[in-house]
Image (cartoon, helix red, strand yellow):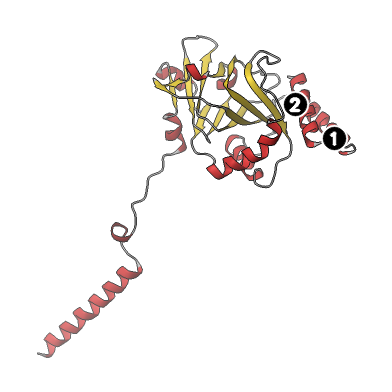
Amino acid sequence: MERATDAMRLLIVGCRRLRRNMLLNPPSSVNAAPKRTKLSSTMASRRLVCGSSPEVLERVRGHVEVREDFISEEEERALLQELEPGLRKKRYEFDHWDDAIHGYRETERLEWGVACRPILARVRGAAFREGSALLGPVHVLDLDKAGYIKAHLDSVKFCGSTIAGLSLLSDSVMRLVSEDNTKDWVDLLLPRRSLYILRDHARFKFTHEVLKDQESFFAGGRIPRHRRISVICRNLPLSAEYQLMLCSRESRLRRKFALTSFSQHSLSTMCCLLKHHLC
């Protein structure tokens, strides 16, 4: 009888301990929602990139990247709130200085508000190696719904190896076409709030363009294109002489306009003209 009583006591104590452990550490299958498996940046980028052949996709491997939902809706609003007042003062133009862009307005910003600085720091951290020499002004390109960027090739002499752009307001399709064989092409789907990165061969061995709305298709599917703003960061070319010259001129502009009543917009415009003159 005593043994039965002892066994019952041990069973009760064990059940109490088991119940306490379950309350403190509930099994995920009971009280916790199943965890969503996140796609790696490589996997996510692959489904946003398609090409004319596996060979051409292999050629651009590591040189093109698209990161979906790189910024949040709140961050997009912060960027737009800072950019819209200046952009509204400009008219859309349909004759770019080198005939590369139609239906656009643009500006360059050296200084950003508190809400936007961390966003741009994150872009630079994702796209450029630590210690890279970066072009100071950030290029802002506003494409009208009827606007587009024609196929063009970046200059090796005046443009760095990497370009990174945030896509605001609209999805779009960027097309890269090989200089060696125009039958080799790569399409990038750039969803709204995504970040695209082009490096090395993708910049200098392939032309790139943003398709017109009526031509905007990706992997056979229609991608409606609306007004689109891109916020673009670049690094400086490897030429030390060019880097020093540009930094010196930009520094002189900063000092000059700091002593006058010129606005931030005027300074940004001057830096934009300086870049275009050099490029």
* Residue in the picture at 27% in, 72% down: 18
| Residue type, label 2 | Cys
Q: What residue sits 75% from the left and 24% below the top? A: 275
Q: Can you say which quadrant of the picture contains the C terminus? A: top right
Q: Where is residue 114? Give x, y as percent.
A: 68, 47
- Amino acid type, residue under disc 1 in the picture: Phe
CA gap, disc 2 and disc 1: 15 Å
Where is residue 69? Give x, y as percent. Answer: 50, 39
Query: Which residue extends farthest right?
Result: 259
Circle 1 residue: 262
Residue name at image x 45 percent, y 24 percent:
223
The image quadrant of residue 96 is top right
Q: Residue furthest left?
A: 1
Of the numbered discs in the image, which one, if any, rests on residue 272? Answer: 2
**Quadrant of res 240:** top right
Residue 181 - label: none
